[in-house]
Image: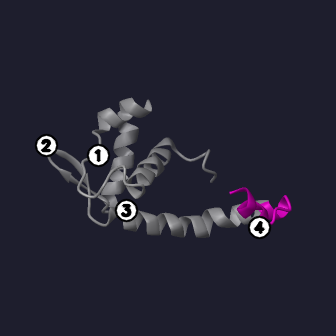
Amino acid sequence: MTKQSRPVYLKLRDQIAASIIEGEYREGQMLPSVRAFAAQEGANPLTVAKAYEQFQTDGLIEVQRGVGMFVVPGAADKLRHSEREQFIKEEWPEIRARMKRLDIAPSELLETA
């Protein structure tokens, strides 16, 4: 499944994961409410809730009833590790195959960076 054809809740999940990894949402910090994040992204609140639920299931956020959802300690490291594994196993082979089809050498990419 390509990134473009992924369900919206997974795209939102990727966006939140990137924000946690990059430190926009730090350990112990409260995430925006479902409604606030949905309004910010122009998404359906149920879709955002599904993305948040996935983080809760994965043990990356904890819910404090009546208060909000918070990033748990170690979440950024866990996400970085799982995102890295996903890239290596799923995305990199596609990128490598496309580079081969287009006759792009890795050194060419390093020169443009």
The quarter holding residue 27 reads bottom left
- Residue at 71% over, 63% down: 110
Measured as percent of width and height from the top left, residue 12 is found at 45, 44
Q: Is residue 33 left or right of residue 38?
A: left
Q: Is residue 64 left or right of residue 83?
A: left
Observer-side mark, 4 or 1, equals 4
Which residue position is annotated with label 1?
31
**Amino acid type shown at disc 2:** Gly
Observer-side mark, 2 or 1, equals 1
* Depicted 62 relative to depicted 12: above or below: below
Contact, CB < 8 Å: mark 3 with mark 1? no
The CA distance from mark 3 to mark 1 is 14 Å
Q: Earlier in the sequence, mark 4 or mark 3?
A: 3
Please identify the residue farthest to the left as the structure is shown: 66
Q: Secondary structure at mark 2?
A: loop
Which residue position is annotated with label 3?
76
**Amino acid type shown at disc 3:** Ala
Q: Earlier in the sequence, mark 4 or mark 1?
A: 1
- Front residue (pair 106, 69): 106
Measured as percent of width and height from the top left, residue 101 is found at 84, 61
- Whether residue 85 is visible, yes or no, is yes
